[in-house]
Image (spheres, rainbow, N blue to C red):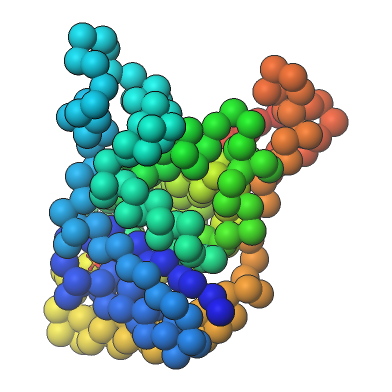
Amino acid sequence: MTTTLIVLAHPDPRSFNGAWANATRRACEALGDTVLCSDLVAMGFDPVERASHYPHRPTDTCFDALKAQEEAAAQHLLPADVKAEIEKLRRADRVVFHFPIWWFAPPAILKGWFDRVLAHGELHCVQHRFDAGHFRGKKALFCVTTGSNEKESAFNGKEGDIQMLLWPAAYTLRYLGFSVAVPEIVHGVHGYHRGARQEVLHDRLAGVLDAQDRLMTEFDSRAFFRFNADTDFDENGALKADRPSYSHFIRKDP
Ligand SMILES: Cc1cc2nc3c(=O)[nH]c(=O)nc-3n(C[C@H](O)[C@H](O)[C@H](O)COP(=O)(O)O)c2cc1C
């Protein structure tokens, strides 16, 4: 049986993002999945990594987040909210993230969830990352909304290529070993239309919710991001001259 974790990064469950996450939950339940949910804002998840999360560490030394996480992991002293999220990630076969684009990136609460939950020493270390990541075999999907339209979010669009805007978040999961599906993106989601245009938008979004059953049923046949293998890089971490790059973030020598 599949276990699906749904992570929602939006302040209001009545929003389209909230409704979309709910449609994912219903679709997964209909498939017989065990469904776990993390509605980050509703949970009051604290996205700021800081010393006060580690009351056991000495206060006379500078707070080093990686070391604090590693030491807490070794002593089973990670914060309770982080432990609970890690437990969900361990149980999940797939994770579906629902969020809007805010300032050309996922909302800060999701970045903070990455910062705190993907704890060094617990979920990754130098020996266990990328191809050797602990979460090899798990799959992730981003279900994303933008206020901008499809053309503005295209590779040559004024708002920047949405696939590139999502790459840092996708690569974060890849670092942990996840396979990351090509995102599902709904453009032009905003409350500014009135009259007929508002109705058109409403109908389009209702169609997205209706289509979520099918999307989740066909999850495994989606395209997945291609990432460079560990062996594509030399001992200094530079892409080997004879290897292709699968991302504009990792470039070939000009
Ligand atoms: C703080 C903030 C920043 C935003 N920045 C962007 C942006 O960079 N690009 C974009 O296309 N839309 C941007 N938007 C619009 C949101 O993506 C849009 O409101 C959201 O997708 C609508 O989904 P919802 O109805 O579920 O909230 C921004 C909205 C907010 C509140």
Residue at image coords 32%, 86%: 206
Q: Nearer the viewer, residue 25 or 76?
A: 76
The image quadrant that residue 224 belongs to is bottom right
Quadrant containing ligand 1 reads bottom left
Q: Is residue 117 above or below residue 201?
A: above
Residue 86 image point, x, y percent: 40, 51
Residue at image coords 70%, 23%: 238
Going by the image, does 61 lie left or right of 33? Answer: left
Q: Quadrant of the N terminus?
A: bottom right
Q: Quadrant of the C terminus?
A: top right
Q: How many marks?
A: 0
Residue 100 image point, x, y percent: 31, 59
Q: Is residue 96 above or below residue 210?
A: above
Q: Residue furthest top?
A: 60
Going by the image, does 8 lie left or right of 153? Answer: left
Going by the image, does 5 lie left or right of 82? Answer: right
Residue at image coords 54%, 75%: 2
Q: Nearer the viewer, residue 210 or 216?
A: 216
Residue at image coords 68%, 23%: 237
